[in-house]
């Protein structure tokens, strides 16, 4: 049997695109252990100086003037795929992509970032590319930048995103709402008592997990932890500081003076364990973080979602009843106190979170992807493909 060769494109504009790609790679390796998988950053096909500038500007906007990003996001959300701007984006790195794919000769290409997806889909439309393109939409909403009629399969988070694609004229058979792929580790059963013992936490008191986004932790994270540490209602807190050394060290004094347990962690590789032992997560509303929490049936308290896709993800969580949103620090503190005093409300949100997703999102996505690559109709598309 021919060895499967898969090319995966993600992007480092936010960590969610990368995590979705890594999850799918894990899933493919489970199904096809001998598969050759090449995972690349879309930015590597751009001019390095331009790529660095785009990432830096994006990070600065997200951190310091998020409303500007929100205005840009919503103003461009209904731009048609045939627009001048989109046609320009569809030419980014075009020659480099063609040359690379012609040399590599993959059986399929998976994209978790919209720009590269559209570039490759345009090549499909022009019959220059004979390799099927699968696009994984990494949010619970759809921006028009994801839309291209020649994407072979869409893997989406929920029926709402399917409906949005249908409204753009994408055929129903091209869309598979398996859920955003998350690492299969999030489907595994965790020994809660063992994890609690390792963290030095008690099994009979509520645990709040505080996590930030990839472009910095939650605003006011130090004060959030201090308020939890001083709470009259007994509560235990785990905060993941990631690569934010300043925050990590600033919490040392809080830990020494607290009457409620506070565990501070740097960058971790066991988020699934931390989510498994927690009663509630205070976080941003990135698509992957939301999916991971829902997979672990963990209610969310979303704090100051960034206008744009995060805001839409937060609206989704509110709509299904799996969490609540706080736009201000005062509102956040009020909700924390309310939920600590009314644990039955957290239980209700957990029930909604449990019912939100079909489960095994990565397995379901991989099954659809492999079915596509094994479909002989797509093999026939290789015939008559134009040269580069």
Image (cartoon, rainbow, N blue to C red):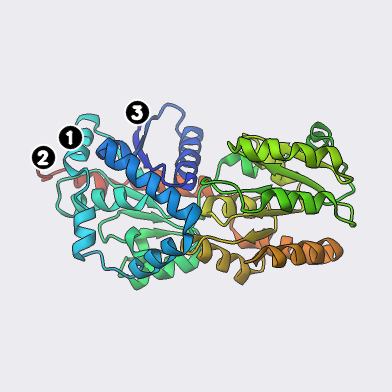
Instruction: Judge by depth and name the residue closer to the eye, 52 or 143.
Output: 52
Left or right: residue 154 versus residue 332 is left
Residues packed near mark 2 inside 10 Å, few (<14), some (14 to 19) or many (20 plus): few
Residue at image x 59%, y 61%?
304
- On residue 99, the disc is 1
Labels 2 and 3 touching (C-beta < 8 A): no
First reached walking from the N terminus: tag 2 or tag 1? 1
Q: In the picture, residue 276 is in which quadrant?
A: top right
* Image vertical order of residue 166 relative to residue 367, above or below: below
* Marks 2/3: CA–CA distance: 25 Å
* Marks 2/1: CA–CA distance: 7 Å
Pick the quarter of the image with the N terminus: top left
The answer to whether residue 201 is visible is no
* Marks 3/1: CA–CA distance: 22 Å
**Circle nearer the viewer, 2 or 3:** 2
Q: Which residue is mark 3?
A: 3
Labels 3 and 1 touching (C-beta < 8 A): no
Q: Percent x, y for residue 368?
A: 42, 49
Q: Which residue is mark 2?
A: 388
Q: Percent x, y for residue 138?
A: 46, 53
Labels 2 and 1 touching (C-beta < 8 A): yes
Residues packed near mark 1 inside 10 Å, few (<14), some (14 to 19) or many (20 plus): few
First reached walking from the N terminus: tag 3 or tag 1? 3
């Amino acid at each position: 049997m021919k060895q499967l060769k898969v090319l995966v494109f993600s992007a480092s504009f936010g960590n969610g695109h990368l995590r979705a790609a890594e999850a799918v790679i894990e899933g493919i390796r489970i199904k096809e252990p001998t598969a050759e998988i090449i995972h690349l950053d879309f930015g590597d096909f751009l001019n390095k100086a331009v790529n660095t500038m785009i990432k830096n500007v994006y990070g600065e906007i997200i951190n310091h003037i998020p409303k500007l990003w929100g205005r840009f996001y919503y103003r461009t959300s209904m731009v048609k795929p045939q627009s001048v701007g989109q046609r320009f984006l569809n030419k980014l790195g075009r020659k480099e992509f063609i040359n690379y794919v012609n040399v590599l000769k993959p059986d399929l290409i998976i994209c978790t970032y919209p720009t590269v997806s559209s570039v490759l889909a345009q090549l499909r439309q022009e019959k220059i590319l004979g390799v099927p393109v699968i696009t994984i939409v990494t949010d619970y909403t759809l921006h028009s930048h994801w839309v291209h009629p020649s994407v072979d399969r869409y893997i989406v988070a929920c029926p709402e995103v399917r409906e949005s694609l249908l409204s753009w004229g994408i055929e129903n058979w091209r869309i598979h709402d398996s859920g955003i792929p998350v690492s299969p580790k999030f489907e595994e059963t965790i020994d809660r008592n063992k994890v609690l013992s390792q963290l030095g936490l008690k099994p009979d008191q509520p645990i709040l997990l505080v996590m930030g986004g990839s472009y910095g932790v939650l605003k006011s994270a130090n004060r959030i932890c201090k308020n939890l540490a001083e709470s009259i209602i007994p509560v235990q807190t785990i905060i993941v500081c990631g690569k934010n050394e300043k925050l990590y060290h600033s919490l040392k004094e809080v830990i020494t003076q607290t009457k409620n347990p506070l565990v501070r962690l740097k960058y971790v590789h066991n988020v699934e364990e931390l989510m498994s032992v927690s009663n509630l997560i205070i976080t941003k509303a990135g698509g992957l973080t939301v999916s991971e929490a829902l997979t672990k049936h963990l209610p969310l308290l979303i704090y100051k979602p960034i206008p744009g896709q995060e805001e839409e993800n937060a609206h989704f969580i509110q709509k299904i009843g799996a969490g609540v949103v706080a736009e201000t620090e005062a509102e956040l503190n009020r909700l924390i106190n309310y939920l600590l005093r009314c644990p039955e409300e957290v239980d209700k949100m957990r029930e909604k979170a449990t019912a939100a997703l079909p489960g095994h999102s990565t397995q379901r996505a991989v099954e659809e992807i492999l079915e596509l690559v094994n479909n002989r109709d797509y093999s026939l598309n290789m015939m008559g493909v134009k040269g580069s």
